[in-house]
Amino acid sequence: MLDLKALRSDPDGARAALARRGGGASQALDQVLELDARRRALLPELEERRAAKNAASKRIGELQREGGDTSAAIAEVKEASGREKELDAELSGVQGALDAALLAIPNPPDESAAGEDTVLREVGEPGASGRDHLELLEGLIDLEAGARVAGSRFAYLKGPLVMLELALVRWALETLAEKGFEAVLPPVLVREEALRGTGFLPDTEQQIYRLPEDDLYL
């Protein structure tokens, strides 16, 4: 989730950065800023109603001790309480919408990132040469066995292909480690807030397995 204070302090800069990202991200920012403005307007109004209710409640006690008429103060408490409930409900809805809108905004691209991809070279003609992936992986992948144990979307990798994948992972980790990256094996199961904080939720919620009894995600 992006820092709301940063978005608020430089909306034009954030909007320009998100426009480079595309996908309607800059429009999502406008919604966030609108909801944030409404939330900030509701907060002092809600506090004002609470203060008025507390002051009227205090006057009721004073009037009761003095034997005075409390009807006006009681009416004021009822009015302030009713408005407080309305404002509190609206604030809750606005806060929920704001949190959801913030989660929908992607990270802006780095300033050094190019606006468009650069094609370095093209080899061959698409669809006119070469073999498809199943031909290339003959003897190295078993789709039928994968389908038997997990369904049609899964497969077994075999032999040299397994070693190649592990070698690529190791090469990538070693390359990153030279640049200061520290490898970490996280817990297999994590809480919802961990996935929201790392950007996996809510966008990929339908692609993540969840253990509802433990309220954990895989």
Image (tube, helix red, strand yellow):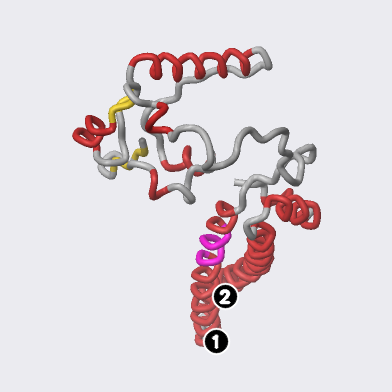
Kind of residue at badge 2: Ala
Residue linked to disc 1? 72
Where residue 162 appears, x then y in whole percent?
39, 18
Residue pictured at 32% horizontal, 42% vertical: 210
Left or right of 156, for residue 198: right
Left or right of 179, for residue 166: left
Q: What segment is highlighted magenta in the picture?
A: 92-98
Q: Is 97 covered by the magenta stretch?
A: yes
Q: Is 27 covered by the magenta stretch?
A: no
Question: Foreground: 43 or 69?
Answer: 43
Where residue 158 appears, x then y in whole percent?
33, 19
Question: Foreground: 213 or 144?
Answer: 144
Residue pictured at 73% horizontal, 39% vertical: 118
The disc label shown at residue 56, or none = 2
Q: Secondary structure at mark 2?
A: helix
Residue located farthest toward the front when viewing the structure as drawn? 128
Left or right of 217, for residue 203: right
Distance from disc 1 to disc 2, alpha carbons, whole Å, reads 9 Å
Residue pictured at 56% horizontal, 52% vertical: 103
Q: Main secondary structure of the magenta part?
A: helix
Q: In which quadrant of the rendered view does residue 125 lie?
A: top right
Residue 58 in sight in this render: yes
